[in-house]
Image (spheres, grey):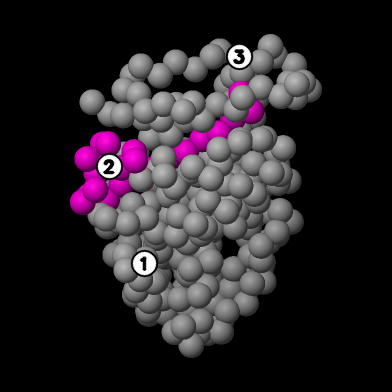
Amino acid sequence: MNISFFNGKFLPHNKICISPEDRGFLFADGVYEVVRWYNGFFFDIEGHHARLRRSLRELKIKWGEEDSFPVIAEKLVKMNHLDDKPALVYFQVTRGAAPRSHTFPSPPVNPTIFAFARPFTPESSGKENGISVMLRKELRWGRCDIKSIALLPNTLCFTEAAEQGYGECIFVKDGFITEGSHSNIFFVIDGVLRTHPESESILSGITRKHTINAAMKCGIRVEERAVHEKELLQVSESFITNTSAEITPVIAFGSIPAGNGKPGPLTGQIHKKFREIVESYARR
Ligand code: PMP
């Protein structure tokens, strides 16, 4: 029986009932986090916790017990007997249930807290052989830095990409590459590792942050400077990053090959260093 967390209680997953007036359901008025459990420890749960706090603050959602996020996440892993397995914990906070209105409930209502842990099998073929990505005009809202549950543009574009055999959909805003539907993206151009700077146009990925750190530890120059579509022909390597897949090489952007169309050597080096950083969390 899967045990999930709902509004202060650990319950069988199928016993959880959410109000039809929940603002998450009616307005996608909420935020989420996904944190990875590596057979015995969480990777940078502090980073995920800080991002959750920020997302809540930006949307003016008050959750009085936000300090309990790591405790709940760990309990879910243990209660679902996932201690020695790879797992993901999904965590969602919405503004709560109230009669439908465009204004926030006044006085505020209790937020709805929902979280679950799932076993997870890390994907290996994309990591070894690389993936091709589809490019699409940016159609999301202007606050992609908030980890909002309003993901319709992301799911629409990713579904279209997957149906066409692509491993990710990458958004292009005013000619510049921002990020993927559920990942950040990096490029090697003239030996320099480049990625979009932190801004309202991208989610500040936890994996992105550690990837930049890993690359610098490898002695690779890193520039947080957006890449223009026109520069894709000069790319020698590329990869995407996210919590579940870590670092996945990109071998083509639509019909344009990334470099020689094979996973590149710097990507391999950076990933190796990234794994060392992950393992350092086991000893904390
Ligand atoms: N951008 C978007 C839009 C995402 O959904 C994700 C995955 N949560 C990321 C970037 C990567 O973030 P992280 O490395 O924290 O998983």
- Label 1, residues with CA under 10 Å away: few <14, some 14-19, many ≥20: few
Measure the C-alpha gap from mark 2 to mark 3.
Answer: 32 Å
Residue type pointed to by label 2: Lys
Q: Disc 2 vs disc 3: Cβ atoms closer than 8 Å?
A: no
Q: Mark number for residue 208?
A: none
- Against 249, residue 64 (above or below) is above
Going by the numbered disc 1, the residue's amino acid type is Arg
Q: Which of 198 and 176 is in front in this view?
A: 198
Magenta span of residues:
75-96
Q: Can residue 233 be seen in this view?
A: no
Looking at the rendered structure, the number of numbered marks drawn on it comes to 3
Q: Residue at x 31, y 29 (%)?
A: 3
Question: Based on the displayed image, in which of its 4 quarters is residue 129 positioned?
Answer: bottom left
Residue 59 in percent (x, y) is at 70, 39
Dot 3 surroundings within 10 Å: few (below 14), some, or many (20 or more)? Answer: some
Q: Where is residue 223 drawn, in percent x and y? A: 62, 77
The three-letter amino acid code for the residue at tag 3 is Glu
Circle 3 residue: 21
Residue 274 in view, yes or no: yes
**Residue 172 against residue 25 in the figure, above or below:** below
* Quadrant including the N terminus: top left
**Residue at image coords 66%, 35%:** 62
Q: How far apart are marks 1 and 3 (CA)?
A: 42 Å
Q: Say which residue appears at 56% left-offset and 13% top-offset.
A: 20
Q: Is mark 3 on a helix, strand or loop?
A: loop
Q: What element carries label 1?
A: loop
Q: Disc 1 marks which residue?
A: 284
- Mark 2, secondary structure of its residue: helix
Location of mark 2 (residue): 78
The question of residue 231 being in magenta is answered with: no
* Relative to 106, 26 lies left or right: left
